Structure formats: C-alpha cells, structure tokens
Image: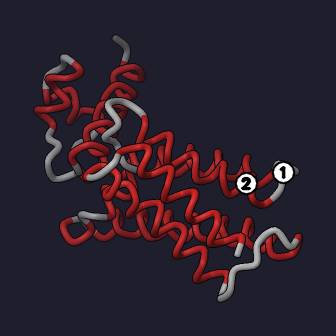
Amino acid sequence: MNSIDTRTQILDTAQDLIQRVGVNAMSYQDISEAVGIRKASIHYHFPSKDDLVAALLDRYNNYFLRLVDGIIAQSDSAEVKLRRYCSLFEATLCSGNGDKVCLYGMVGAELATLKHPLVDRVTAFYRNNEARLVQILNQGKESGEFSFVGDIQAMATLIFSLLEGGFLVARAHGGASQYRAIIEQLIQLVKG
C-alpha cells in the first residue's frame, strides 16, 4: 500500500466514522482497526487528531462546494437548483446504513470541544453554503418562482439550518422518508 492510498484510506475511514458517531467518539484506534494499519502509521500522516479533522474538513469543503457550484452554474430553474442542492444532503443520509449526516454538521455539533482553526473552517462552510443559497433564492425571486415573504439571507440561513438539523431528526425518527418530507415542505414554503 503506498502512502497516498494509506492517507486516502485514513481520511475515508475517519470521515465515515465522524459522520456516524462524531469527532469525539472517533479514535485513531478505530481507524487503525478499520484500515488494518498501526496507529503510528496514522500519526505519520496526521500527527494529531486536529490535523486529521482539518484535512477532512478541507477535503469535504472543496468537494461539496464544487458540487454546489456545478448546480448553480446550470441553466436550470431556481426550484430545480434548490431541489438538487437539497438532494446532496439527502444522498448523505441515504449512504451507508442510512445513518450518516453532513461532516460539517456533525463537527459543528461539537464546536465547544474543538480548537479555533477547526471552528473557523466550520463557520466558513456554513457561510459559503448560505451565500450559494442566496444566489439560488435571488434567481427564484427574480424569475417569480419563489414568492416567500421575508429576507433572502434569513431564508438561506433557515434552509441550511433545516437541512443540517433535519439529519438529526431523520436519524432519530423516520429516516430518509421523513427527510424527503421535510425537504418537500421546505420547497412549498419557498414557493410561497
């Protein structure tokens, strides 16, 4: 196994664990057992847990925002763009055993136990998602597809909060079908 493959396996395994159980419940021992390497090998690539989490957040941020930017760049209607954006979250919930949440949502739930640079990454991810939602909402308002009452920025924050928080509710009650119902209600709210 070369070091790039090992590093990727470590990141993939850590991401899966964090999306299921959180940062504080995930250990290098868990990763070691799942990947089949010694903990020293993990420390070689990521000297501290904070280094590992930072690398994960950066990787996830780049991947996720690239997907969102691709959605925004399409010539689709604002409703289609909003549905596709929401489907990114639904796909996360439906992956694996149907028990994953957004990496940033899970890490965000543990902000009080994280160090400053990690907190900054989480805050930036939330802001970047809200900014992209504002673009979609502005398009919908301008085209007449969306006629919700209130501030566009506040609606973007509401949508992002609902999608992130909806993971936790859906995991505890109703799963993917509950999450789809939440998204559908959200679309109706935005359409006015």
In-image side of 176 versus 81 (left or right): left
In-image side of 79 versus 144 (left or right): left
The residue lying at 34 percent from left, 62 percent from top is 118
Residue found at the far left of this picture: 29
Q: Position of residue 39 (x, y in %)?
A: 13, 29
Q: Quadrant of the C terminus?
A: bottom right
Mark 1 residue type: Asp
The residue lying at 27 percent from left, 45 percent from top is 18
In-image side of 45 versus 78 (left or right): left
> Which is nearer the N-term, disc 2 or disc 1?
1
Determine crowd level at label 1: few under 14, some 14-19, many 20+ residues with C-alpha closer than 10 A.
few
The quarter holding residue 17 reads: top left
| CA separation in Å, label 2 and label 1 | 6 Å
Mark on residue 16? none
Q: Quadrant of the N terminus?
A: top left
Is 155 placed above or below 62 here? below
**Front in this rendered view, residue 18 or 166:** 166
Is 131 placed above or below 75 here? below
The residue lying at 56 percent from left, 63 percent from top is 185
Badge 1 is on which residue? 76
Mark 2 residue type: Lys
Badge 2 is on which residue? 81
Q: Position of residue 188 (x, y in %)?
A: 64, 66
